[in-house]
Image (spheres, helix red, strand yellow):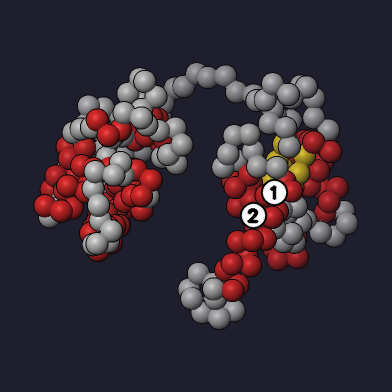
Amino acid sequence: MPALSEIKFSTNEFALLNSVLPGGANWSKFIAGKGTCIESCPYFGPCTNGGCQGPNRVCSGKWQKAEQTPIVLAVMNHVVENFDHYNQGDFDVSKDRKILGKLKSRFVSALKKVATDRKYSEGHPQLKKHYTRERVSSAAAAKKLSALAGGKLVCESCKTDYFLLYGHTALWLIECHHKIPISSAEHTGTTQASDLVLLCANCHALAHSSNPPVPIGKLSKLVLAAANKSFKEGGPDGLSP
């Protein structure tokens, strides 16, 4: 796997990256006293779970030696996109924002190439021992079937009726979300129907994009706002709806 140093950065690009990437004195106020990454970074979890760990990880003064793995390239792209946040004032690109655009293009192109060309070793059997929270699948099934008895299976966030779209296949597309996570100290150890909310996979993932999960009322507003924005801007392909 090639290292980031194999990307031919110009002098200005190299200086910009050194300005915003961790490892130098300018990052002292972001480091939590233990040399760790910024927990507010959206890639903090993937990085600390093995994505960028090691002496040559992106979040170090040796960022050039980090391999061009998908997570490393995604982090580099994230840092460039949020330059104003990470820059400590030692690098002024107000006169030439083209540097950021060129860097973003480099990382996106590299990420696409890695995603296309890279081969992953997987499928080997592994024995793992771990604890898991007990779940009662019949509770989720009962919630779905109760809703289906009314002739609908609606995501309570985006309000899409998946039974109308896909028939009984919707039973596999709609998921049950615990309003109070079973891993939470607030969970009493018992679950009833009123504790569960029916969500499509997309909205369910969005609900768990924060900890604690996004409340259903706020989740619905986020989804509605996103739908309105997409409609006004002509959708993701830029065409009029």
Relative height, residue 177 to residue 114 (above, below):
above
At 17% across and 40% down in the image, what residue appears?
64
Looking at the picture, tell me which residue is in the foreground, 128 or 159. 159
Residue 87 at x, y percent in the picture: 31, 44
Q: Quadrant of residue 138?
A: top right
Residue 161 in the figure: left or right of residue 151: left
At 30% across and 33% down in the image, what residue appears?
27
Residue 218: which disc?
1
Is there a contact, CB below 8 Å, between mark 2 and mark 1? yes
Residue 100 at x, y percent in the picture: 27, 57
User: Looking at numbered disc 1 in the image, what kind of residue is underneath it?
Assistant: Lys
Q: Circle 2 sits on which residue?
A: 222
Residue 189 at x, y percent in the picture: 76, 21
Q: Quadrant of the C terminus?
A: bottom right
At 25% across and 52% down in the image, what residue appears?
92
- At mark 1, the secondary structure is helix
For marks 2 and 1, give the CA distance. Answer: 6 Å
